[in-house]
Amino acid sequence: MRKVIVSEEKWCNEHKRLERVDLYEALFHQFGTDECGENVAATVAIVERIDNGQVEVVFPGNIRFVDREESSVPAVGKTHSPLSELMISDIVYRLGLHPSVKVLSLSLIQFARAIEAAHGIGE
């Protein structure tokens, strides 16, 4: 979980305008959807207040992440996958193509089947 600051816009009589005011620190859990009617839905952020543990639903524009840490959910490019070790030469070999053939000219199905075959997965 990442630490966030939850804020809101309040009217400032002195400056005669809306100003963003920090309310409290919280831990961000995830984004969700709040259905407000039959055909109306809004994206929300689910946060847990640090001071009392209360879980609240706020609009994403009202949170600010205060750390730059990586998410606990690994990014696509950072996970280990057999496909990360796949070489284009494996695909060309499995399809029985001459190395001069452009891979982009293959159909997506051929390409997917070649990836599966190169790693011994699929049908």
Image (cartoon, helix red, strand yellow):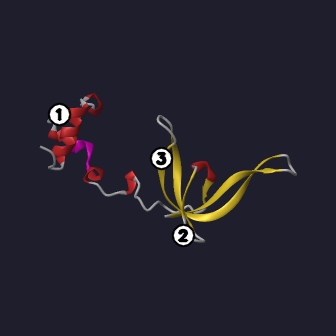
Residue 83 coordinates in the image, percent (x, y): 27, 50
Q: Is residue 40 above or below residue 47?
A: above
Q: Give the spatial CA distance, label 1 vs label 2.
A: 60 Å
Quadrant in the picture for residue 80 = bottom left
Please give the name of the residue rendered at 35% of the width and 57% of the height, measured from the top-left corner: 79
Residue 64 visible in the snapshot: yes
Quadrant (top left, top right, bottom left, bottom right) of the C terminus: top left
Label 3: which secondary element: strand
Q: Residue at x 58, y 69 (%)?
A: 50
Between discs 2 and 3, the one toward the N terminus: 3
Label 3 near label 1: C-beta < 8 Å?
Answer: no
Mark 1 secondary-structure assignment: loop
Q: Which mark is residue 97?
A: 1
- Residue at 28% x, 54% y: name it: 81
The residue that mark 3 highlights is: 33
Three-letter amino acid code at the position of disc 2: Gly
Around disc 3, counting alpha carbons within 10 Å, would you say few (fewer than 14), some (14 to 19), or many (20 or more)? few
The tag earlier along the polypeptide, 1 or 2, is: 2
Q: Position of residue 117 (x, y in %)?
A: 15, 44
| Residue 103 drawn at (x, y percent) | 27, 33
Q: CA distance from mark 1 to mark 3?
A: 48 Å
Q: Give the camera-side residue of 104 and 19.
A: 19
Q: Is residue 25 left or right of residue 34?
A: right
Instruction: Report how far apart the C-alphas of labels 2 and 3 lie in the structure.
Output: 21 Å
Q: Tell me where residue 9 appears, x and y as whole percent.
A: 71, 50
Residue type marked 3: Thr
Q: Furthest-right residue in view?
A: 14
Tag 2's secondary structure? Answer: loop
Q: Nearer the viewer, residue 55 or 5?
A: 55
The amino acid type of the residue labelled 1 equals: Leu
Relative height, residue 81 to residue 117 (above, below): below
